[in-house]
Image (spheres, rainbow, N blue to C red):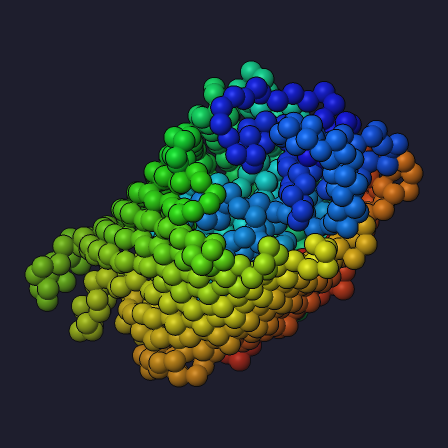
């Protein structure tokens, strides 16, 4: 075991006793220290600080220290320590490199290269190096992922060509162990990135472990855990100027307080961001209309009274107010009635982990209060929409603790969502109420076969969802409808249940390379028909279903991942075929008002290929490349909703490409220079169903230059350096004229300062 005396100076570990494997003992010894043990190809254990990856300390180094976990080895071979030091030093020289990223996508901690499925992980260091402030800044660096950000508090995310503009979101979305999911809302809330541990993007259906909504994939946002031993702090200040718009600023801070060393710690995070607007409204005369303020507060209290029990209480609040969206004409103006958006959510969670010896028991309890308020005008009268979603969930999970042999995970899941909506249009008030109560039982097991070269994984999830729609309805309308349908009460219920299997085969070609195949089923829960649609259809003599069935995706994937060039390069590649069934579509039931109803309609398929590559050619430099191509088309026509066989799937770009380079080099013994550059490309999107104007091809360029001391950094950066003004989303057409649509923020330059102490 190799480590620097500087690295461990002043650090203490908790004493341990008992029978453990080497890895188990090291995990216990290093718990809460911030240090990590990595095993080199020849078996040498190297202790390092992940926070200092790519930031070598240039001060004169103290001698390396070699330790053995079994002292009898050194006694029987007197020169073992010297040989170990020589071998480890050579390996350290050859592995300048790529940091090994640990993920928990499979509900257990694993190296990302050991997970036999397509996954991209964005670490805290990578987000900070890019200067990312929200998920939309970097998610498209994951192959097969595209994002449309309205810059008003919500984002539309699609993975591998699976997309929707209504119903529940087609992706799974988690904050730590909290399912961040809603009913009848296909977009997801904006999440700020300050003090996140990492973001994991799982591509392809995740119906077994993550369930409802994980149709195209799942995004997991993981916040940093309280450190039990170290007082830590982080301050981050930013000021920017946008071409043709208002200035912006942001202030963020984190404080980690060990309250009882090694047992209790509190981590507090707060940020305030004020984004200046850049769109001018010619109908109201308001300049820079789409300004936005975002306040975020987060707290985590961690209690670890012994080495078996770990309890985390967390709170997360976000409050966002936007004066408008980024929908404009090419000249960055709009003449549409402005719509302000206020979004806020409070999340509370209790996560309890207990080591049973043979397995880890996890209980994750959460509550979320989500609120979305929109305000505009029509004919001089207010148009208001006030939506609340209350989400309660519980997951009880048991995961085997062994790393060898048969490994398994199983659990139970419960979730209840209530969604009241109040609206006002032209002085008339309307209301909606929807409810979802769902249950699931799931399990997944992995069997090592053929001398542990081949792993077979089988998984299964049973899911049941009961939905209710009980919109207010006046007595006269109810009586009129009951003349045609006496059973109609205004209360509409539907229920679905679905079984979702997964099969995975992973062939470990060598210690560095893996081939895998994955067959999985994903689903998106069905919907209850809106009451107004049922009433209108009944009065018009049109038959529509009370509820529609779940959407289904069967996915077939082949992939490979591994490292080469002596660990300085990593490659991941995959090809897939998705069979998409029971698509949810809208049919018009009243042509004058264009009121629609839901039904299951066409089918589609997506065929794609993905590639991601990371390389460290020299010390301090890291190159990243990701690319994807997806051919998504409807395979079954539905004339009622203008879907033709062979048409491209709505709002799915065929090609995405992302490339970035990071370089850090020493200027003096205590000062480093830093440079980062990136380019992101997204091809056009279409919407033939609604005859909308296609989006443009979009290329965004960014750069960041800085100076770094041991605990501080000063950076000059630029976003959208080419001042790209392309339409990033499809646009409506009225009387032959293309309406305003979403566009990126114009060229923005800024200064960022950070200070961290550990």
Q: Residue 702: name its quadrant.
A: bottom right
In the image, 390 versus 61, the foreground residue is 61
In the image, 11 versus 194, the foreground residue is 11
Residue drawn at 64 percent across, 72 percent down: 697
Residue 111 rendering spot, x and y as whole percentages: 57, 48
Say whether residue 433 is visible: no
Which residue lies most toward the right here? 668
Left or right: 584 in relation to 474 = right
In the image, 482 versus 718, the foreground residue is 718
Residue 104 rendering spot, x and y as whole percentages: 50, 45
Residue drawn at 56 percent across, 16 percent down: 260
Q: Where is the C terminus found, in terms of image quarters?
A: top right
Residue 686 rendering spot, x and y as whole percentages: 52, 75
Residue drawn at 85 percent across, 32 percent down: 61
Q: Where is the N terminus found, in terms of image quarters?
A: top right
Left or right: 206 in relation to 34 = left
Left or right: 706 in relation to 67 = right
Which residue lies most toward the top here? 260
């Amino acid at each position: 075991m190799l480590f620097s005396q500087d690295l461990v100076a002043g650090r203490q570990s908790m004493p341990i006793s008992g029978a453990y494997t080497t890895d188990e003992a090291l995990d216990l010894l290093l718990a809460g220290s911030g240090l990590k043990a990595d095993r080199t190809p020849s078996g040498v254990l190297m202790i390092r600080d992940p926070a200092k990856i790519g930031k070598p300390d240039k001060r004169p180094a103290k001698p390396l220290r070699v330790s053995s976990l079994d002292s009898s080895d050194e006694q029987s071979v007197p020169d073992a320590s010297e040989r170990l030091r020589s071998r480890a030093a050579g390996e350290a020289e050859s592995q300048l490199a790529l940091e090994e990223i640990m993920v928990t996508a499979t509900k257990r901690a694993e190296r990302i290269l050991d997970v036999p499925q397509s996954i991209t992980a964005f670490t805290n260091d990578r987000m900070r190096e890019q200067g990312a402030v929200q998920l939309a800044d970097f998610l498209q660096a994951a192959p097969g992922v595209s994002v449309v950000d309205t810059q008003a508090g919500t984002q539309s995310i699609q993975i591998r060509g699976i997309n929707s503009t209504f119903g529940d979101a087609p992706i799974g979305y988690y904050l730590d162990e909290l399912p961040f999911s809603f009913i009848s809302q296909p977009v997801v809330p904006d999440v700020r990135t300050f003090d996140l541990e990492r973001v994991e993007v799982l591509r392809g259906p995740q119906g077994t472990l993550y369930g409802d909504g994980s149709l195209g994939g799942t995004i997991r946002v993981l916040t940093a855990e309280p450190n039990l031993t170290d007082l830590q702090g982080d301050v981050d200040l930013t000021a920017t100027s946008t071409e043709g718009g208002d200035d912006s600023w942001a202030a963020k801070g984190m404080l980690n307080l060990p309250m009882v060393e090694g047992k209790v710690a509190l981590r507090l995070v707060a940020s305030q961001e004020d984004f200046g607007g850049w769109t001018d409204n010619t109908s109201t005369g308001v300049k820079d209309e789409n300004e936005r303020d975002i306040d975020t507060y987060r707290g985590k209290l961690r209690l670890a009274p012994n080495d078996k029990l770990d309890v985390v209480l967390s709170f997360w609040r976000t409050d966002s107010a936007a004066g408008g969206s980024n929908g404009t004409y090419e000249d960055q103006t709009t003449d549409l009635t402005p719509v302000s958006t206020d979004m806020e959510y409070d999340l509370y969670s209790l996560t309890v982990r207990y080591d049973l010896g043979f397995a880890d028991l996890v209980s994750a309890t959460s509550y979320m209060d989500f609120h979305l308020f929109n305000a505009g005008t029509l004919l001089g009268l207010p148009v208001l929409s006030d939506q609340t979603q209350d989400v309660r969930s519980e997951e009880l999970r048991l995961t085997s603790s062994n790393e060898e042999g048969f490994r398994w995970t199983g659990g139970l899941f419960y979730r209840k969502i209530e969604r009241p909506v109040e609206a006002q249009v032209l002085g008339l008030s309307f209301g909606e109420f929807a409810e979802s109560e769902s249950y699931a039982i799931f399990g997944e097991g992995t069997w090592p076969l053929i001398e542990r070269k081949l792993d077979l994984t089988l998984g299964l999830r049973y899911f049941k969802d009961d939905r209710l729609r009980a919109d207010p309805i006046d007595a006269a309308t109810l009586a009129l409808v009951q003349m045609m349908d006496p059973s109609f009460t205004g209360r509409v219920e539907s229920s679905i249940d679905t079984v979702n299997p997964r099969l995975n085969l992973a062939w470990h070609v060598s210690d560095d390379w893996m081939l895998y195949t994955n067959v999985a089923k994903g689903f998106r829960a069905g919907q209850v028909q809106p009451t107004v649609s049922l009433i209108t259809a009944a009065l018009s003599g049109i038959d529509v279903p009370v509820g529609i069935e779940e959407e289904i995706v069967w996915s077939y994937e082949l992939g490979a991942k591994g490292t080469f060039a002596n660990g300085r390069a990593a490659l991941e590649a995959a090809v897939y075929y998705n069979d998409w069934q029971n698509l949810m579509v809208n049919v018009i039931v009243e042509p004058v008002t264009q009121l629609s109803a839901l039904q299951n309609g066409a089918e589609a398929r997506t065929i794609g290929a993905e590639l991601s590559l990371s390389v460290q050619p020299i010390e301090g430099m890291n190159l990243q490349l990701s690319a994807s191509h997806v051919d998504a088309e409807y395979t079954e026509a539905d004339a009622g909703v203008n879907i033709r066989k062979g048409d491209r799937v709505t709002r799915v770009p065929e090609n995405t490409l992302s490339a970035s380079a990071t370089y850090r080099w020493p200027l003096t013994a205590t000062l480093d220079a830093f440079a980062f550059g990136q380019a992101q490309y997204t091809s056009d999107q279409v919407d033939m169903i609604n005859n909308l104007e296609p989006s443009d091809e979009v290329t965004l360029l960014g750069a960041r230059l800085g100076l770094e001391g041991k605990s501080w950094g000063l950076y000059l950066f630029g976003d959208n350096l080419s001042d790209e003004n392309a339409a990033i989303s499809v646009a409506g057409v009225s009387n032959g004229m293309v309406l305003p649509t979403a566009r990126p923020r114009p060229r923005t330059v800024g200064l960022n300062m950070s200070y961290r102490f550990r």
